[in-house]
Amino acid sequence: MNDDKLTLYYYKDGLTQNERLEITNALAADAEFAARYKALCAALSQLSDAGPESIPTDMMHRFHDTIDRASNRERGSAPVKSPPMHFWSFFWGAAISAALALGIGIGVWFSGAGEVGPDSGGPYVVGVTPQVDIVPVVFQRSIQNYLRESERDITDLPLDAEADRLMLILRLIEQNRLFEKAATQNNSPDLARVLRAFEPILVRLASDDIAPEDAEALRAQLSFELNVMLTKLTRDTSDGRLSNSEST
Amino acid sequence: MKNFRKTLFILTAIICTALAPQAVAQSTDEDELKIAALEALMAAPPERALPIAAKVLASDNSDDVKERALFILSQIDSPEAHDILIRTAQENSGELREEAIRMIGIGGNSVALSQLVGLYENGDEEVREAVLEAYVIADDQEAVYVLAVEASKSGSEEDFESAVEMLGAMGAHEQLRRLRESTGISESLIEAYAISGDADSLRELALDGSDPELQEQAIEALGIVGGDAVNATLVEIYRNSDSEDIRESAVEGMMISGYDEGLLEIYRSSQDPVEKKELLEYLVIMGSDDVWDIIDSALDGGL
């Protein structure tokens, strides 16, 4: 992936939803790539701090060329279907950010702090005006997939291996936050509330002094609620109860 | 006769003990079946699901089964479903009540949410915690703000701190700023500003020397927010302050923020060996990439 694409990603400009998703996934999965992006962010941040007159001419040309190329490509390209979601690619990003949050001693949930760079909207936020009562199809598919995957993860959660359980739960919490944010921004406040309600249970489940029977009860509760939500979404989609849009 | 009674009692006890696991197992199986049925109930239209869920709740079922029925009700947007949730929260105790409160948060109905205030005022610590959690789930920042104000008025420090902490987690900048105006600044508010990422409020407090202790906390809290502007402020505070404690807080802030470049800059510009020694310790803790060059240079006798 070249720096031009990363520059556009930084400025949230000129990339399709799929391209942005691809970069987000790559950043979460590849530490070297993430470090390269961090360095680029630092450079671009300095550029914006220093004011326009201090930007080197060649860099400005390069940036303009990048914008031009992207806008030409956008004009000429047909809409592309979304690729399948790679949930496991979020694993390390999730674990690291959650561990950082724990490390600084913020023992609360739902923290929106700690996001790096200007692009913090999460990968499943579809560009829809909040006032319009439309739930985009891409988001619906993503959330159904997420609920299915989470239910599977919760069922397979190793209750006897503390470290493994903690890592998996940290990942689930991070994903849950992403989807809660996405639900809010995609006209689904009811879904956002349910996802928000999952987090305290996940936090309790991550506790190292939880009794096995309590852990089992929490796991069963989460599993039930995930399944109910999945059933509800499927029902609403097939009944046409959810007004939706193919636009991304 | 006495012996007969005793024998009968022992026999009864044995029979009960022998049958107990089977009864428990049967009950568990029954519960599992009921829970599976409730799960499937969500596929039905809400008008058909509601009376069935209500019946489960009113019948002699285990708390586990009733709690699942509560979740189904939370997903039905009708006044009747909201009423059942409120009644369950008001008329029950223990986990079932707390779960009903959580479901009111998930349901997000404003009328039902407003009923939680009464439960909060008259409830024990667990109920108050559940109500607060419900407001966070519903993202009702104003309700949490009101609880914080009331807790401050009644002098309940613990409740105030819990509410403020939640406002921080909710990113309720506006409500937190209003709280500062109405209750004055406090350690918990500073923490909440940090958690919510309100760098502007923290910067203002970090530059206000009227209460040095709170100023130090605000400076360190800036480090949690982080970012270029915050880092620049921390360096500025360090350079402009004559107070040892404030400078130390600024360094702590930079360490929390991970701004080793700033510390390096200060280290390189300093001509004071004592100051350099202290800064070097921080840089080592931070694992800065340049720290080995500095150590090398210090060992060579360079400042």
Image (cartoon, helix red, strand yellow):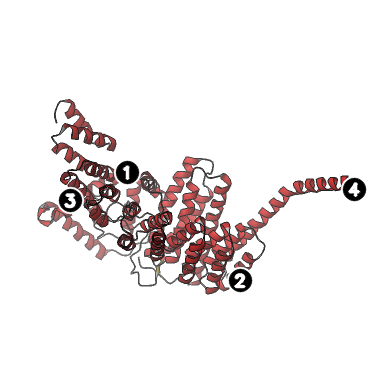
Can you identify the residue that label 4 sits on?
B1
Residue at the spot 60% in from the left edge and 67% down from the top edge = B53
Q: Nearer the viewer, mark 2 or mark 3?
A: 2
Give the residue type at disc 3.
Gln
The lab-note entry on whether marks 2 and 3 share a chain reads no
Element on which disc 1 rests:
helix
The lab-note entry on whether marks 1 and 3 share a chain reads yes
Q: Chain of mark 2?
A: B
Residue B171 position (above or below residue A33): below
Of callouts 1 and 3, which one flags the residue occurring earlier in the amino acid sequence?
Answer: 1
Give the residue type at disc 1.
Ala
Mark 2 touches mark 4? (CB < 8 Å)? no
Residue B51 numbered mark, or none: 2
**CA–CA distance in space, label 2 to label 3:** 62 Å
**CA–CA distance in space, label 4 to label 3:** 97 Å
Mark 4 touches mark 3? (CB < 8 Å)? no
Residue at the spot 24% in from the left edge and 57% down from the top edge = A11
**CA–CA distance in space, label 1 to label 3:** 23 Å
Residue A31 numbered mark, or none: 1
Give the residue type at disc 4.
Met
Can you identify the residue that label 3 sits on?
A46
Q: Residues within 10 Å of mark 3 (few under 14, many from 20)?
A: some
Viewer-proximal residue among B257 and B208: B208
**CA–CA distance in space, label 1 to label 2:** 53 Å
Element on which disc 4 rests:
loop
Q: Residues within 10 Å of mark 2 (few under 14, many from 20)?
A: some
Residue A1, visible in the rendered structure: no
Residue B221 numbered mark, or none: none
